[in-house]
Image (cartoon, helix red, strand yellow):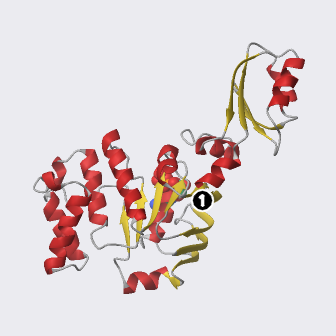
Amino acid sequence: MLALDRLAFRYAAAARPALDGISLRAQRGEVLGLLGPNGAGKTTLISLLAGLLTVQHGEILVDGEPLALVRKRHPTRIAIAPQEYAFYPMLTVRENLCCFAGSARLTGARLGDRVRAGLAFAQLERFADVRAERLSGGLKRRLNLAIALLAEPELVLFDEPTVGVDPQSRAFVLESIRSLASQGVAVIYASHYMEEIEAIAERVAILDHGRVLRDGTLDELLSEGAAHLAITLESGGVEQARALLSRFGELLDGDAPLRLRLAEAQRVAPVFAALEAAGLRVRHAQFGRCDLEQLFMSLTHRSLREA
Ligand SMILES: Nc1ncnc2c1ncn2[C@@H]1O[C@H](COP(=O)(O)OP(=O)(O)OP(=O)(O)O)[C@@H](O)[C@H]1O
């Protein structure tokens, strides 16, 4: 449905581009997760898709047509649930929904239907007559979500929608977004929480410094790092162990534990045999499929949280 080709963007007076040649695809019925640390370019990308920034280089196509044209013809086909709260604090939940439904050109019975559907979808019925400023962080997020969905968009953009949300509302927001995709909507979900991306995205693009480091299905990305071994030694011998381990794959940064990405088809048993033969005793070892955090670390040598 959505195709981004060689998208680049530089803010005025910025030393380097915020986006630097992004090419990606998003499909209906699928959640595309944009995973990257702060400053990776997620908000810039979402803002370009939402029409809040103007494309400088490259192109964005929706079903083969330029995004600007699609937005002009059908302004409500693409919706955004932004990072910040996007409603009027002094208005009640229902008044906010009616107001935004009106600005999405909904009228009459359809407006009423969509406001009711929004309240139900976000489970906000009980709070319909509460002023938005009095809602908890989680309920405010749900209102953001309900507003974004009023005009039944085909593509919904989420930018860190769970920041400042309690765990229960977080689970609710994630579940709601997944259910949107299963109804056939295309979803783009930007976050620096790899747990969320792993929980809801079918496809993932890992972003850093305005570039896509990897993209693919979640399974493809996770299996990429399948052979990941972390070893803590009993005592000493770290330099000797580093030299030995590097024969079996790529050693990542850090000594405790020593982390090794095994070379393709390299089995793990010979690694332990070699350590034992060298008299190096292992206190703790962890081996298995890596998560997105480990994949990010192996690509950038930084942690998603610290980056
Ligand atoms: N208005 C702006 N003017 C200049 N530079 C900006 C502006 N907004 C963002 N940037 C820079 O562009 C780069 C990408 O920022 P962006 O906000 O898109 O990243 P992000 O992945 O969404 O991170 P965050 O979650 O912190 O918003 C960063 O280097 C940031 O400092």
- Image position, residue 47 (x, y; %): 44, 66
Residue at 48% across, 75% down: 54
Return the residue nearer the eye: 41 or 234. 234
Q: Disc 1 beta carbon < 8 A from ligand 1?
A: yes
Residue at 27% across, 61% down: 146
In this rendering, position of residue 273 left or right of residue 37: right
- Image position, residue 175 (x, y; %): 37, 52
- Image position, residue 108 (x, y; %): 13, 80
Residue at 40% across, 81% down: 71
Determine which quarter of the picture holds residue 306. top right
Determine which quarter of the picture holds residue 182. bottom left
Return the residue nearer the eye: 169 or 265. 265
Disc 1 element? loop
In this rendering, position of residue 171 left or right of residue 187: left
Residue topped by disc 1:
210
Q: Quick check: 56 above or below 198?
A: below
Return the residue nearer the eye: 147 or 219. 219
In this rendering, position of residue 22 left or right of residue 243: left
In this rendering, position of residue 165 left or right of residue 18: left
Q: Dot 1: few (<14), some (14–19), or many (≥20) neighbours within 10 Å?
A: many
Determine which quarter of the picture holds residue 23. bottom right
- Image position, residue 59 (x, y; %): 57, 77
Query: In this rendering, does residue 166 appear at all?
Result: no
Quadrant for the C terminus, please. top right
Q: Amino acid at mark 1?
A: Gly
Query: In this rendering, does residue 229 appear at all?
Result: yes
Q: Residue furthest top?
A: 235
Q: Quick check: 90 above or below 7?
A: above
